[in-house]
Image: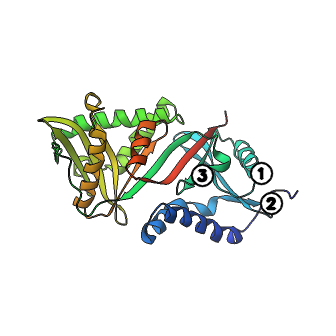
């Protein structure tokens, strides 16, 4: 059995890795410009990764600080016995957990026992999506924004904690960083739109989207139905609002993230045809 050894040059590995990632995005239905844009995000920092081989396949790993924790990442694994080596390599460099990204939502294979931390989902939207009968949509007002922001941040932190990878303190810090990154000008941040969904004269939910997030793609940061209105069919209605908002911004596809542990939402997205672009899984090493 060949020993697993670290290689000094990435050239022999990198081309095949990028093609595997692109194949995953294409299989999920991404047009080529979007697949290429997603690949660019997937290989960010690639020159700092450690690549190893046993002569039959490849392992690519790194260790980095993330949300106050030392995290190992397995970026590629085509060596049948490589998972144990990768986990030991990460643990030996202080990693508290190991994460893996599965492009195109492919079969988790060796990582089937890693809990799901989150998914990115996407679907092309209809040419002229219609709002559901009985539901009206309007822009959230600037006066409503502070209360919306506080509720949105609390919901985001709850989602992070449900996924199980971060502590409460780390979740709060991540939330603060993410909101500051994506909404640097708050309500007036260019490219972002905020909506209120109303039925029978009452606000039943809200939406937050970012147009042009990627080529031809609107990112749905939040399509939230208020708790007291859940179970009334508004979840599917909110997805229709997201599609409508996507076309309002001139894009052709809608993309969003769902955290692990939210099986109800994942079931809804499966039933409404949103393909998995990326699935993130993790294993606690502590």
**How far across and how far down the image is residue 76, in percent?**
65, 57
Q: Measure the C-alpha gap from mark 3 to mark 2.
A: 23 Å
In this view, the residue farthest toward the left is 201
Q: In front here: 65 or 127?
A: 127
Tag 2 residue? 54
| Up-down relation of residue 91 to residue 31 (above or below) | above
Q: Is residue 243 left or right of residue 133?
A: right
Q: Measure the C-alpha gap from mark 1 to mark 2.
A: 9 Å
- At horizontal 43% and vertical 71% (from top left) the residue drawn is 33
Q: Are marks 1 and 2 in contact (CB under 8 Å)?
A: yes
- At horizontal 75% and vertical 44% (from top left) the residue drawn is 88
- At horizontal 52% and vertical 35% (from top left) the residue drawn is 166
Tag 1 residue? 81
**How far across and how far down the image is residue 214, in percent?**
38, 62
Instruction: Locate the N terminus by quadrant.
Output: bottom right
Tag 3 residue? 107
Q: Measure the C-alpha gap from mark 3 to mark 1.
A: 17 Å
């Amino acid at each position: 059995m060949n020993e697993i050894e670290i290689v000094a040059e990435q050239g022999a590995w990198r081309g095949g890795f990028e093609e595997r990632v692109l194949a995953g995005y294409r299989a999920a239905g991404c047009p080529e410009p979007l697949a290429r844009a997603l690949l660019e995000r997937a290989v960010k920092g690639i020159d700092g990764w450690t690549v190893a081989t046993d002569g039959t396949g490849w392992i690519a790993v790194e260790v980095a600080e993330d949300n106050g924790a030392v995290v190992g990442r397995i970026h590629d694994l085509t060596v049948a016995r490589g998972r144990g080596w990768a986990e030991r390599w990460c643990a030996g460099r202080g990693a508290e957990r190991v994460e893996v990204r599965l492009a195109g939502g492919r079969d988790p294979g060796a990582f089937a026992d890693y809990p799901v931390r989150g998914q990115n989902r996407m679907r092309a939207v209809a040419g002229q999506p219609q709002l559901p009968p009985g539901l009206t949509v309007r822009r959230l007002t600037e006066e409503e924004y502070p209360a919306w922001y506080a509720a949105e941040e609390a919901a985001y932190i709850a989602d992070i904690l449900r996924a199980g990878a971060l502590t409460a303190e780390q979740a709060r810090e991540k939330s603060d960083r993410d909101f500051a990154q994506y909404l640097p000008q708050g309500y007036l941040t260019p490219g972002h739109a905020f909506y209120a969904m109303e039925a029978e004269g009452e606000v039943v939910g809200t939406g937050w989207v970012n147009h042009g997030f990627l080529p031809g793609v609107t990112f749905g940061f939040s399509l939230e139905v208020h708790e007291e209105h859940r179970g009334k069919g508004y979840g599917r209605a909110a997805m229709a609002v997201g599609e409508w908002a996507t076309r309002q911004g001139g894009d052709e596809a809608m993309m969003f993230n769902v955290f692990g542990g939210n099986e109800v939402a994942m079931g809804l997205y499966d039933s409404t045809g949103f393909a998995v672009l990326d699935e993130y899984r993790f294993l606690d090493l502590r």
